[in-house]
Amino acid sequence: MEKKKKESDIQILRRLFSLYAVHNKSTIVFGILCAVVTGVRPYIMIILSGILIDGLLNGMAFRTLILWLFGGLILNWAAESLEAWFREGFNGRVENCLERQNRDMNEKSLYSDYENLENPELQEKKRKQEQVVNVRGGIYWMLIWPMDKGLTGVITVISAVVVAAPLFAGGSGAGHPGLAVLSVALAVMVVACSLASYKNSDYWNKKIRKVFDQYAKCNRVSNYILHNILTDSETGKDLRIFGQQELIEEGVLGQRQEALDRLKEIRRQAMAQSGIEATLTTVNCGMIYLYAAFKAYLGLITVGSVVKYASGIIECITGIKNILFCVTGWRQAVDYGREYLEYLEFENRIEDGTEPVAENRDKSIQLECEHVSFRYPGTEEDVIHDLNLKIALRPGDHIAIVGRNGSGKTTFIKLLCRLYTVTEGVIRLNGRDIRDYTYQEYVDVFSVVFQDYRMFSLELGENIAASEEVDQERALDSMRKAGLGHRLEKLPHGLDTYVGKEFEESGVNFSGGERQKLAIARAIYKDAPFVIMDEPTAALDPISECDVYESFDRLVGHKAAVYISHRLASCRFCDRILVFADGGVVQNGSHEALVEQEGLYRQMWNAQAQWYADGAEA
């Protein structure tokens, strides 16, 4: 495979700006307007000061001086007002930078392949970007803030050239032969100091970047502990039972302190950078004022021009510094932005086909696996290996998949539901490769209750319907069928009751068993033709699990269903049982047939029979 050519910094900047401008064109427009007014406005008072000083020294009429003064002040007031208006519009839009990046990253997480959520490379990129958001305001802030400085710098420099250029005109004749040399020396000094300032900024920013990456790593660990451990009620039980408070406290304080030490180091380095730049600026200003004063002493310029020209050149130096700041800032933005674009463009492997799924609930579903193998990203060992399987599921047929933990049962279901793409081979539904089907239509065929199901801290109805639009009667019926009718009667706000108290004090903390039934109610509500139960009752005792499975079996009735469990009695009512081991199917048949055969199923049944009331050894 041909290696992708690395993009240049300019290409990365252009892409970042294009991405930001899709929803924020007005920010750039306001930024340009701000830069024009901000860059020009200081020269109003600079020019006015020169005119007034020369006017006073040359005996200008008082009335004329007053007119110049008020005219300049009014013009400056108008420019300041315009700048404030543009600046307010610009700042208001820049505040959306953080929201824009968060939205981009959230959309990536929402619509990325499921397998990408477990990809360590992608998740590391995401964690880095989260730190950029938390500490530096995000990629777009690092893009727009230097742009503002840079544009203002360009306008400032252009204005300075117009205002201060006469300082270097003339005065190099026979009467003052050394002035030309002094002019060149001054220009060289200004350029040298500006370049030194840029190099200084670049040097320290690289050091700060290294320390920042170390800080970000420490901060990620401490934030994980603070936000994922201390606030989680499930984790809180183990925390207290095993007395892990001291362990966590030491971890938080240790990582927090290390992060703070890194942050202090960043500030110390930033102070060193600022100190050197202040020294270079002072040298520049001193040289400029001496040069202008010397020309005034020689009578080549007026006293008022000293203020005008010197102030103009100092503004010019400030403008150059802003331009160099923009260059340095954009170099940092490119470093982080390259990773940001790689994160956003991390390719999905799940193919979205074009074929519609012809749903007919009265016909059988044909499933076929042909030489299917699968290994998880970043691993070298197959979890499913060379699986060949044909299943015909008629409406009302119920199949069980059993096997020990780690045998590949859940992975097979994830492949079937297109949460993962097979590494080798093909899975077919009704004779067609499942990758040929339109993805959303395909997943609509399945209603799955996973082992690690989740209920969100939203309204009960939204949890069951998986949507803001809730069919009230259908949701209530699903809850009753799932065995929650009695619980529903006690809820303070019915389907509008929040699950948990994270957002509403009146929310309800449902028990583990009730949450299982809510997950089942969600599966019932979807009303898909193919139902899968992926060990959602693993935490229950064997008898209770068996009862739940048999109750759910009655609910699905006419639908095709697959039940997954490592407890055999929970699935013995099924028409057919597939026994998984080492990533493949090692036995296939009814409970009665399998329990009579020598093999894994019989071994597992005999080992588990003691837990069931009617479980005599075969």
Image: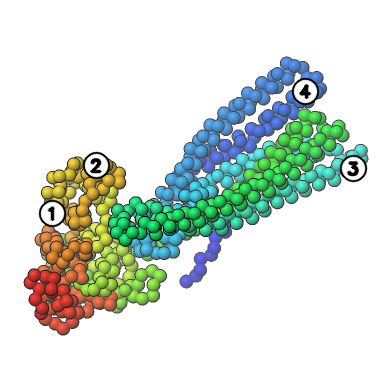
The 10 Å Cα crowd at callout 1, few under 14, some 14 to 19, many 20 or more, is: some
The 10 Å Cα crowd at callout 2, few under 14, some 14 to 19, many 20 or more, is: some
Q: Earlier in the sequence, mark 2 or mark 4?
A: 4
Q: Earlier in the sequence, mark 2 or mark 3?
A: 3
Mark 4 secondary-structure assignment: helix
Instruction: Give the Cα distance between marks 1 and 3.
Output: 102 Å
Mark 2 secondary-structure assignment: loop
Q: Earlier in the sequence, mark 2 or mark 1?
A: 1
Residue type highlighted by circle 2:
Ser
Instruction: Give the Cα distance between marks 1 and 4.
Output: 94 Å
Q: Nearer the viewer, mark 1 or mark 3?
A: 1
Q: Position of residue 398 (x, y in %)?
A: 14, 67
Q: Residue at x 23, y 49 (%)?
A: 509
Q: Nearer the viewer, residue 292 or 415?
A: 292
Q: Nearer the viewer, mark 2 or mark 4?
A: 2
Instruction: Give the Cα distance between marks 2 and 4.
Output: 76 Å
Residue lying at the far bottom in this picture: please name it. 598
Mark 2 highlights which residue? 506
Residue lying at the far right in this picture: please name it. 174
Q: Which of the 4 quarters of the picture holds residue 441?
A: bottom left
Q: Position of residue 542 (x, y in %)?
A: 16, 67
Mark 3 highlights which residue? 177
Mark 1 highlights which residue? 483
Tell me if residue 475 can be seen. yes
Q: Is residue 348 above or below residue 427?
A: above
Quadrant where the image shows the C terminus: bottom left
Q: Nearer the viewer, residue 302 or 445?
A: 302
Q: Residue at x 32, y 70 (%)?
A: 422
Q: Nearer the viewer, residue 117 or 418?
A: 117
Q: Earlier in the sequence, mark 1 or mark 3?
A: 3
Residue 55: numbered disc: 4
